[in-house]
Amino acid sequence: MLQSISKWVLSGCCIIYGLYLLTLAFQYADFSVPAEPIMSEIYKTRAILLLPLSIAFIAIGAIFFVILRQKDPSLINIQRNSGKESEERILVETWKNFCSSKEKPGEEHRSFWAYEALDRLCDEEPERGLAITIAICDSTEDEFVLANVAAGPLEDLLARHGNRVVDQLESWARQEIKHRRVLASVWKNSIDDKIWERVSKMTQGAESY
């Protein structure tokens, strides 16, 4: 990993140094600065020398960057994944805060964005929406929050994308009684009959919240 980071740093340094030389070249190319003709020629010569040198450094750094990205994308993937995990943790905590807040829930609530974000994921990216919904359940013992998960995102997922999430929910339900209690708190509403039949089998004997 350290060797990989060193290569990325070297690539960046080449590009930065190339940009620095390019800046100097443009400064020397400004012939209006020196008043003496001799100095103008000296500055022109420096500009002519620095211009291709700066382009060479930028090109080397850019080529090196492209090669590294193709051969060793691990660093970029780590950064993306860690950023994504951080966003999901924030969403989990903010959703719980919105749900358990003593303030009246609504669009004016400072954490309402989390409600909207999870609802959108449940609609457009059900697998990710389910992962966050499960993360919320696994991170709290607050029965009020768990009941709201059941009546909110979990019910929405089963109604909108039952066929895509029901298998994972069956595995999840087998893990512990709390999971089955959350599922037992879901209302059928518009959930497909076949999906609801499977949910009912998962929750046999479980008390709802």
Image (spheres, grey):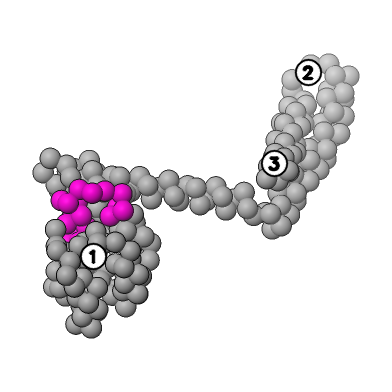
Q: Which image quarter: residue 17? A: top right
Question: Which residues make up the magenta segment?
Answer: 136-153
Q: CA distance from mark 2 to mark 1?
A: 81 Å
* Residue plotted at (78% across, 46% down): 60
Give x and y (percent) for residue 21. 76, 32
Label for residue 34? 2
* Residue plotted at (47% across, 47% down): 83
Q: Is residue 205 above or below residue 5?
A: below
Q: Which image quarter: residue 159? A: bottom left
Give x and y (percent) for residue 44. 84, 29
Secondary structure under tag 3 reads: helix
Which of the pair 112/62 is nearer the observer?
112
Crowding near pointer 1: few (<14 within 10 Å), some, many (20+)?
many
Q: Is residue 104 above or below residue 208?
A: above
Q: Amino acid at mark 1?
A: Arg
* Residue plotted at (78% across, 18% down): 34
Secondary structure under tag 2 reads: loop
The tag earlier along the polypeptide, 1 or 3, is 3
Identify residue for label 1. 180
Identify residue for label 3. 2
**In front: label 2 or label 1:** 1
Give x and y (percent) for residue 173. 29, 67
Q: Is residue 176 left or right of residue 77?
A: left
Which of the pair 4/110 is nearer the observer?
4
Q: Report the quarter where the N terminus lies.
A: top right
Give x and y (percent) for residue 105. 14, 47
Q: Is residue 6 left or right of residue 123?
A: right
The tag earlier along the polypeptide, 2 or 1, is 2
Residue 65 part of the magenta segment: no
Which of the pair 138/21 is nearer the observer?
138
